[in-house]
Each structure stands twice: as structure tokens, then as C-alpha cells.
Amino acid sequence: MNENLQHRIRARLLKLAHFVALFIAMAIICVPGLWVVLNSFRPTVDIMAKPPVWIPRGLNLDNYRAMFGAVGEGGVPVLQYFTNSLIISVTSTFIAILVGMAGGYAFARYRFKGKAAIFIGLMLTRAVPGVSLSLPLFIVMAKTGLIDTHMGLILVYVALNVPFTIWLIDGFFRQVPIDLAEAAEIDGCTRWQAFWKVEFPVARAGVASAGIFAFLTSWNEYALASQLTRSTFSKTMPVGLRDFTSEFTINWGGMCALAVLMIIPALILTFIVQKHLIAGLTFGGVKG
Amino acid sequence: MAQVQLQNVVKKYGAVEVVHGINLEIADNEFVVLVGPSGCGKSTTLRMIAGLEAISGGDISIGDRVVNDLPPRHRNISMVFQNYALYPHMTVRENLGFSLQIAKRPQAEIDKAVDEAAQILSLAEYMDRKPGALSGGQRQRVAMGRAIVRHPEVFLFDEPLSNLDAKLRTQMRTEIKKLHQKVKSTIVYVTHDQVEAMTLADRIVIMRDGHIEQVGTPLEVFETPANTFVATFIGSPPMNLLSGQIAGGEVAIDGGPKVTLPDQFAGKVQDGQKVILGFRADNLMPEGHAMPMEGASAEFEMVVNLSEPLGTETLLFGSLAGKEVQAKMLNPRPVADGERLQFQLDLTRCHLFDAETQQSLR
Ligand SMILES: Nc1ncnc2c1ncn2[C@@H]1O[C@H](COP(=O)(O)OP(=O)(O)OP(=O)(O)O)[C@@H](O)[C@H]1O
Ligand SMILES: [Mg+2]
């Protein structure tokens, strides 16, 4: 056989192997998600069946109908949970991004006393597992009357996210050449204008990625929220999932339906900013 | 009117003083080049004029205003950065128009100014591209365009050509010169390339270690360097410097031949004074391959260690009194390494420096 042909065949086979390997990897990653989606459309009998029923038979919207139905007939205050989640996540993300931008910019651009120490301190807070804070937080919140309020969770999530957003945004501003701001100042900008018109747009990708990470953290957080919320007034969707467990039974179908509702906004958001996200993760394209 | 004046300008970073009280007057429409080795404070000086760096002492004025504490935007200057510093998220058109946009000028005026600049710098085809999609030379032109749209009183350039390859550099050098003729503004230009300095400048400012060593036209600093530093920094190859002593109307080169004291230094030196004799390769030529010398000349023998043919002339590396000396040979013939030749030194073009102060004795 001709040598070129051999190489071509080998290259093809290799490519095929890549696809197969990728497919398997993606399948493993996606199966739980798909399983949740699938389960949300079928009765508990099918969900619990042994051996598992892979090929769906008879899908329906019963779980969704029940979920939006009256309380007592399997209904949960979905809209209320959704609104709570949205308010808490969006507000805390917004604040975390503002603080992250101010902090990240300061760390990237200015020299000040104790800079390294403060930075390390911020990073160390990431090393503390969030759950270990739940009791102290509970006590503080209880004393300040912030239990079961939006404000309480927003504060917690801001605190949780700020070190991370500062760290991420700092990295992005570091990569924006300082000359750009100087050029803008010479072109007539104030320091403030130079930031908003030049440095911020250039580092926008970083801010967007920090934003989405912060949002997803708040959106998905369960451990602390389950301690600090009580009623429909402030319960978030992850906490709401527990409404489907009762003393003796777990309504898996309903839980999956709510989980799907939870995943959808996160997916949409990720899609919207994915361009920035990818640009952000492969930063360095900024050349003067 | 936009003359620039620096009076006793000092720059300190913490306790370290990097610019030591420099004085400089730049006339309106003058093209002044700051040149000097790396780290001598050229960029710092330029950035102080721009207002990007606070001054630690002295006064800077632009036009008839003292601008010591004014932010860059109130100084009516433009600056071209070494790495261009184009705004990567804006198109070329937006980059060019940015300063006018900030100044809230009417759109029609912005368009007109931008198109004019684009035409001067032949940027018309690239107007809708982002800087990332431009070559180095094109980016350089955009950076210059951005500087000229505002018609500032003073242009500041910080090594604008150092990121370009040799050919493009020569080309852009010419363009900058043309630009100056067109826009008629005061220009302060920083470079460490003495060829750039010589070709562009109305006046050259030679800096070293935060001091100004000499200010003069390119010919002045070439022909009458104020000290040995300027003598070796300006001109290529660098000036030959040999230490010696004045001895009865002659300069006795340490461990080498004696040459007659050049006329221009008669009465300016004392017997026994330690001096440094300086001459350029162009003024030391082997017999039979030299320019006819009009004035006094000295002759001595020298061994040639190495020769570099350059076509119309050959550069010879000899050794005299244990020091390497460079000479030039016109109408060159092949020279064998180690060949001993008789050389003629044009005394009228020699320089004498005091050995202690290193200053010219002229
Ligand atoms: N932020 C700073 N802190 C301390 N020293 C500094 C700082 N910036 C510059 N220097 C020092 O000031 C001196 C002059 O620097 P400058 O950048 O003006 O040199 P330069 O002449 O432009 O050199 P080059 O040709 O390499 O650009 C240098 O010795 C440098 O180390
Ligand atoms: Mg410099």
C-alpha cells in the first residue's frame, strides 16, 4: 500500500477516535442533566423503574401542571421562588461586579500599603468552606433580623463572590496596557472617562465572565440559602426543591420539573454571554 | 505659539532622583529630539511634559502657561507611544476621532478632521478595521493620525519607530519629517537611535543619567561634541579616543606616536596637561587612499587587524598604543589582516578633551 494512503487512513481513524472519545465524555457529562429533563416529563413509576427505562414511553406535562397547581395538590409557589432567586442573584451579582471592578482595578493599577496582604487575605476567604459559616451566619442574621429576607442572602452572596470577582477582574485589567488609559487621558479624557471609555470596554470580557460566575454561584447556592430562608418570602429555587420531599415520599417528577425551570435561565444567560466568556477565557488578544 | 520650557525640572521616584534639574527651551515649530542611552531619563522627561508623570521640582511651561499641575487633557498636546496604544475595541476611524468625540465637537467637524488625517497618512482603506487587523507600520500611522487630528500645540513621540523593522523605520522616519513640514507644530521626539536623531532633528538634546550633556543642531553635536560622551554617542562608528599628554606643542599619545597640537587648540592647553585626543574614522586614512587634506596632518604607522569592506570604502580596525582605532580607506583595495600601513590624520578635524573633566577643550 502506498505510504501516503496509509497516513491518510491513519489520520481519519484518529479523527474518528477523537469523535468517539469526545462523544463518550460529553455523554457522561450530559446524562444527569438529560435524565433530569426526561424525568420531569414522566410519572414516578417510570422514574423509579428497575431496570431503568431509558427510552421514554408516554411523556406528559403532569409534573409541571401539578407544580403550578394549587398548594396541597403537589403545587409549589414556583413564581415566588423564581422571583426570589432572580432578585437575589441579579442584585448580588451586580454588587459583586461593581465591588469586583473597583477592587480589581485598584489591585491591577495602584500601589498601596499592604496590597499583597489584602490580596492573600481575600483569596484565603475562598479556602473557607461556605457551609462552615452557616451557623455563625445564622446567628448574625438572626440578631440583625435579616433571616428570611432578600437582603440577608444578597449580603451573603456578595461576600461570597467578591473575592472571586476581584481576583478575576484584576487579572483582566492587568492585561490592559496602562498606555491605553494614558493615551485616553492625552486625548482629553478625565481619569474616570478613560476608565469607562477605554479600559472598561477592553476588559469587558473579563467583567462578563466574572458576572456569569457570580450569577451562577448565587443562582445555584443551596447550603446557606437553606439555613437563612424560611418562607416563600425569601426561599430561592434550590431551597424550593425541598418542598417536594415529605415525610415518607419524594416527588421526584416534581423536583425534576422545578430543576428544569432552574436550569433554563442559567443556560440562556450562559449562551448570551458565551461569546464574551470564551473571549474572556482566551484573553490576550488585546494588542496595542 | 507653543514653545516648551523646562526649568530645573527634577524627577524623583521615592528617594531616587532620575532627572536632575534639566533646563531646556524648545522654540515654536521646532523639532527637538531627546537622545541618549537606555535609562537616561528621556521617557521620563517626555512624560513629565505630557503630564503623565508628576514633576518633583522645577517648572514646565507650554506656550506661555506654566503647566506643572495641569492634567494631560489641559495641556493641548498629543503623544505617540512606543507600542502605539491604539484602542483595540475601536475601529481606525473611531480611534482617530476619539479625542474630538471626547471634546464633544460636532460630528461633521470630526468626520472632516478624521478624513483629512487619514488622507495625510494614507489610511483611507483601513478606516473600518480594528487595530488588531493592521500591520505594525499601519498601526504606527494610525497612532500618528490620532495625534494630528486635534491640531495640538505640541507633539510628543516616545520611540515611535522602535517596534518596526529596519526598512519600515526608514520609511516612517521620512513620513514623520514630512508630517512636521505639513502640520507645523512643535515636536519633542524621544529615541535612542542616533541616526533617527540626526536625520529628524532641528536640534538634538543628548541626555545621560538624567543630565543634559549637550544641545545643538545635528551638525553642531557631530562636529563640536561638548565632551567625550557626546563624541562617542553621536556618529557611527564612534569617535576614536586616545589618552595622551601635552608636551611642547605636541600631543604625546600614551605609548604611541606624537602628533602636532592642532592649531585650533593652540593657547587652550597647558604643557603637561593630560588630554584625550579624539578623531573620527573619516579623518584617519591610509596614504594613497585618503582624501586630500587641506590643513595640517599627522602621519603614523598602524597595524590593521581587521577590515570591513563597505563597497565605496573600507572600514579598517587597527591598534594604536594598545587601543582599537577605526579608520577609513577610500578607493579600497583588499587589505590583509595584520598589514602595516602608513596613516594620515587630519589634524584640523581633531578634538581635544580634558582627561579629567572629559569636556572639550575647544
Ligand atoms: N516607576 C519608576 N520607579 C522607579 N524608577 C523608575 C520608574 N520609572 C523609571 N524609573 C527609572 O528612571 C530612569 C529613567 O527612565 P526612563 O524610562 O526615562 O529611561 P529612558 O531614557 O526612556 O530609557 P529607554 O531608552 O530604555 O526607554 C531609569 O533609570 C528607570 O529605572
Ligand atoms: Mg523610554
Image: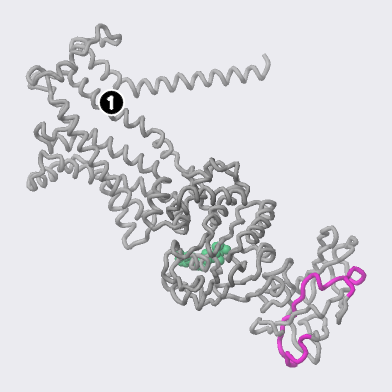
Chain ID of residue with mark 1: A
Q: Is residue A247 above or below residue A181?
A: above
Percent x, y of residue B73? 44, 61
State the residue at coordinates (70%, 75%): B220
In which quadrant is the N terminus of chain B drawn?
Answer: bottom right
Q: Is residue B107 above or below residue A249?
A: below
Q: Is residue B20 magenta?
A: no
State the residue at coordinates (19%, 39%): A131
State the residue at coordinates (55%, 62%): B155
State the residue at coordinates (47%, 48%): B107
Span shown in magenta? B264-292
Can you name the residue that lies furthest to the top here? A57
Q: Is mark 1 within 8 Å of ligand 1?
A: no
Q: Is residue B141 left or right of residue A50?
A: right
Visible residue check, residue B35: no
Q: Is residue B244 left or right of residue B173?
A: right
Of the pair A218 and B53, the residue shown nearer to us: B53
Q: Name the residue that disc number 1 marks.
A: A264
Percent x, y of residue B282? 80, 70
Q: Where, by quadrant of the figure, is residue A204 drawn?
A: top left
Percent x, y of residue B213? 61, 76
The amino acid type found where label 1 is placed reads: Ile
Can you name the residue that lies furthest to the right here? B288
Question: Would you call the spot at circle 1 few (<14 residues within 10 Å), some (14-19), or many (20 or more)?
Answer: few
Percent x, y of residue B9? 49, 75
Of the pair B322 and B289, the residue shown nearer to us: B289
In which quadrant is the C terminus of chain B drawn?
Answer: bottom right
Q: Is residue B361 left or right of residue B109?
A: right
- The number of callouts visible is 1
Q: Is residue A5 above or below residue B315?
A: above
Structure colour scheme:
one colour
